[in-house]
Amino acid sequence: MAEYLDPPAKRRKIEIEEEENEDVDAPDPPAPQVRLLAGVTYDGPPGFGNALESRFSNITCLAADADGAIYFADRNVTAAVICLLKDGTVSKYAGADNGGLETDAIVRPLSDVRFGWPKSFLIGPNGTKYLSDFINDNIYAIVGNNIFSIAGSEPHDQPTATEPAPAPWGFQKPTRMAMTRNGSIFVLEASYPPRIRKVENGVISYVADPSYPGWPGPSYQPQVIVASHDDSRLLFSDSGDHSIWQLPLAGGPITRVETYLPPGSSANLEFVCDAGA
């Protein structure tokens, strides 16, 4: 059987073209684009419908579900949790129009609940949504169109701050929440003293407070808490000295991860946990 070989000159030309192609730099990825999703200036009207024509104020609790819907709380204008759909419309997801009840362990419709100051919104592995209320001292669960308190609807006098206690028990100024992949919820409390506690299977348990080794110190002002993607640690921010700290969930002292601003700066430290955290 005859073999047909490229002549040497042709083979050399192909080799040169391959070398030149290897030297060509890949095009730079497009620059990230920032665009407005919802809200107008203070001259805009409150209300719902077109997201770019609705006014909000003091927005917290940003979260997104698997379908791309974005949830956030608007404390000052509508006093509700808002849902922003991919089609650019906003609607009230939870919150009473006028009055309403400060919800307790009784299951109630989403439209019957009066929020004080929603601070954190999480979506669990099974789709259950969780909301912390800084004023009402509650952690709520949302299943379907109903909402109820899972922790915090009783007075603050639980037996001790460091012993497990059946939920509901009182929280003091719950701010942000973090969730591990197994559904455990860690709550950052801006009480005095501040502390971190866990809600799991109907039980509140102690995680850390100023007595814990490595706690940031008397200037600590809690802002944000997240769980790392491998569930090995909690990361939380401190707007007192503008640092991010880490707490190993397997045990061990709290350590500083990074400092962003000099002491005495006037700023709140907000952050998110990226894929490498």
Image (cartoon, rainbow, N blue to C red):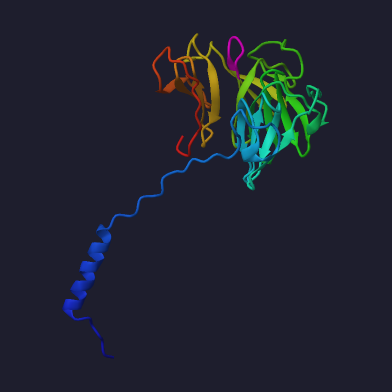
* Residue 233, horizontal then vertical, whole percent: 51, 29
Foreground pick, 72 / 64: 72
The residue located at (54%, 24%) in the rendering is 224
From this viewpoint, is residue 184 visible?
Answer: no
Q: Which residue lies furthest to the front in this view?
A: 43
Viewer-proximal residue among 249 and 149? 149
The quadrant of the picture occupied by the N terminus is bottom left
Q: In the rendered structure, does residue 96 fall within the stretch colored magenta?
A: no
Q: Position of residue 145 (x, y in %)?
A: 78, 38
- Residue 64 sits in quarter: top right
Q: Where is residue 3 in the image (x, y as percent from the top left)?
A: 26, 86
The quarter holding residue 188 reads top right
Q: Please name the residue shown 71% across and 26% down the image.
A: 79
Q: Is residue 111 left or right of residue 91?
A: right
Q: In this view, does 264 lie above or below 244?
A: above
Q: In this view, does 128 lie to the left or right of 265?
A: right
Per the rendered image, the range of residues in magenta is: 189-195
In front here: 10 or 52? Answer: 52
Q: Which residue is drawn at 52% across and 41% down?
A: 35
Q: Which residue is drawn at 29% across and 55% down?
A: 25
